[in-house]
């Protein structure tokens, strides 16, 4: 098979990575995609670094078994804790979500005060602080761990007008508002579903989602390595999960913005 027609691999600890897949499908409609959601071990955010690295190795090896031409780590926690490790181990282009979002935030901010919200592991890693500083050394970065947001989104509590996520987000975001940030990175692929509530709480702040930023980075990587598909046909997406395919098919459509048709396959590590 022509390497250009091989699929792009995308993985996440759960459903959130489908927000990245949504962007890829929008900009690269002719590409084939293999998506793996590690729903049996979600969330990664509260795990140790060693455990996360092992999980990411499992995810990478599964995707590579499907002969993918590139991999997108569509999970901020996995990217921040394990990307450097997997780049050493596997001979395939790897695109994350942290660096592209950091680059976009650094270019967007006018006052150099940038906020980041994410899981405990993402914030603890300092990956966003390091990445933003590499693009804008004078920038001040203020990060807040938001452990309640992923469970809320997974339970469907993300819509504007729902008082529960609004109360939780106001508590998490108030300290960042007090820091006068003018740019906020939603440092988890679940968080784009909370965009409307966040923008209502912080109306004058530029909000950066990792999906569009990482898709731009993916396109640049595929162009650089001459890996863009030449097909005129619509790409095919195949879904794999490590727990509850029925639940994934039912809930995943919320994240990807379309019905998940066809089978969702169960993977046992």
Image: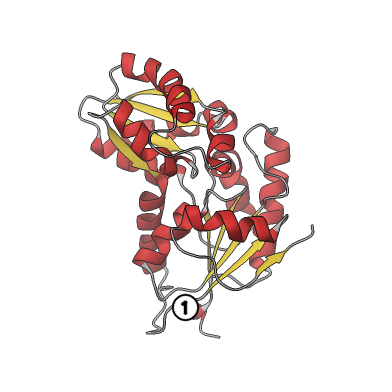
Q: Quadrant of residue 159?
A: top left
Q: Position of residue 182 (x, y in %)?
A: 26, 27
Location of mark 1 (residue): 4
Residue furthest to the left in view is 110
Q: Quadrant of the N terminus?
A: bottom right
Q: Is residue 224 left or right of residue 120?
A: left
The residue lying at 37 percent from left, 39 percent from top is 195
Visible in this render: residue 105?
A: yes
**Count the marks: how many?**
1
Q: Is residue 59 left or right of residue 102?
A: right
Q: Quadrant of residue 160?
A: top left
Q: Is label 1 in a helix, a strand or a loop? A: helix
91 in relation to 142, above or below: below
Q: Residues within 10 Å of mark 1 (few under 14, many from 20)?
A: some
The residue lying at 47 percent from left, 59 percent from top is 21
Q: Position of residue 74 (x, y in %)?
A: 52, 51
Q: Position of residue 265 (x, y in %)?
A: 69, 67
29 in relation to 55, above or below: below
């Amino acid at each position: 098979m022509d390497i250009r027609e091989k699929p792009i691999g995308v993985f996440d600890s759960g459903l959130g990575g489908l927000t990245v897949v949504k962007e890829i499908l929008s900009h690269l409609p002719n590409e084939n995609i293999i998506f793996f959601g590690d729903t049996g071990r979600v969330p990664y955010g509260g795990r140790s670094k060693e455990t996360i690295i092992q999980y990411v190795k499992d995810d990478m090896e599964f995707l590579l078994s499907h002969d993918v031409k590139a991999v997108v780590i569509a999970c901020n926690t996995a990217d921040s804790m394990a990307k450097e490790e997997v780049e050493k181990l596997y001979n395939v282009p790897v695109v994350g979500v942290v660096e592209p979002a950091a680059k976009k935030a650094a270019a967007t901010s006018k006052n150099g005060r940038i906020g980041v919200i994410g899981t405990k592991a993402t914030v603890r890693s300092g990956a966003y602080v390091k990445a933003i500083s590499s693009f804008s050394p004078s920038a001040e970065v203020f990060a807040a761990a938001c452990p309640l947001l992923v469970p809320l989104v997974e339970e469907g509590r993300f819509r504007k007008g729902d008082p529960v996520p609004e109360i939780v987000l106001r508590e998490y975001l108030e300290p960042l508002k007090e820091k006068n940030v003018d740019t906020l990175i939603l440092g988890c692929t679940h968080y784009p579903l909370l965009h409307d509530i966040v923008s209502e709480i912080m109306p004058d702040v530029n909000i950066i989602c990792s999906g569009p930023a990482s898709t731009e980075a993916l396109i640049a990587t595929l162009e650089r390595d001459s890996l863009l598909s030449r097909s005129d046909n619509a790409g095919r997406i195949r879904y794999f999960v490590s727990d509850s395919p029925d639940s994934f098919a039912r809930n995943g459509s919320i994240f990807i913005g379309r019905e998940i048709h066809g089978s969702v396959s169960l993977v046992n590590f």
